[in-house]
Image: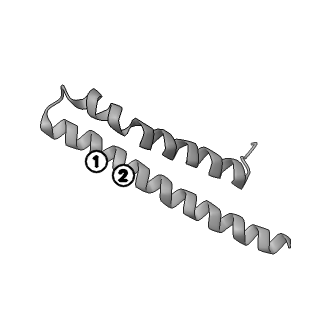
Amino acid sequence: MNQLSIDQRITRAQRLLQMIEDDAPLLDVRVAPLSREHQESAKSHALLLAKLTRAEIKKLRKEKAEADRTDA
């Protein structure tokens, strides 16, 4: 199985985060026809996904720093 390098995983996570952040205004438009409860659920999910992605980026950067230290 071909695994992605830490740098590739960081780049992917950063792209995902950027997409989530860029999509926020469009999300408001897309969920406008939904009930208040569904709007809040969709927005909450997007916020949670962004939070988890930031945590993943932080974890990967720490992993990379440790690997760089080990290789040095």
Residue that appears at 71% across and 72% down: 66
Residue that appears at 80% across and 73% down: 70
Q: Is residue 10 above or below residue 58?
A: above
Q: Nearer the viewer, residue 28 or 37?
A: 28
- Residue 21, percent from left and from top: 43, 43
Residue furthest left as drawn: 36
User: Which residue carries the number 1 mark?
Assistant: 44
Q: Which mark is residue 12?
A: none
Q: Are marks 2 and 1 in contact (CB under 8 Å)?
A: yes
Answer left or right for 64 relative to 33: right
Q: As shown in the figure, which amino acid type bears the numbered disc 1?
A: Ser
Q: Secondary structure at mark 2?
A: helix
Q: What colouring method underlies this structural image?
A: one colour
Answer left or right for 11 relative to 3: left
Q: Quick one: label 2, few (<14), some, or many (20+) residues within 10 Å?
A: few
- Residue 2, percent from left and from top: 76, 42
- Residue 60, percent from left and from top: 62, 60
- Residue 44, percent from left and from top: 28, 47
Quadrant for residue 37, please give it. Answer: top left
Q: As shown in the figure, which amino acid type bears the numbered disc 2?
A: Leu
Q: Is residue 10 above or below residue 23?
A: below
User: Which residue carries the number 2 mark?
Assistant: 48
Residue that appears at 61% across and 44% down: 12
Q: Is residue 65 above or below residue 8?
A: below
Work out which quarter of the rendered image holds the C terminus and state it. bottom right
Q: Secondary structure at mark 1?
A: helix
Q: Is residue 21 above or below residue 66?
A: above
Work out which quarter of the rendered image holds the N terminus and state it. top right
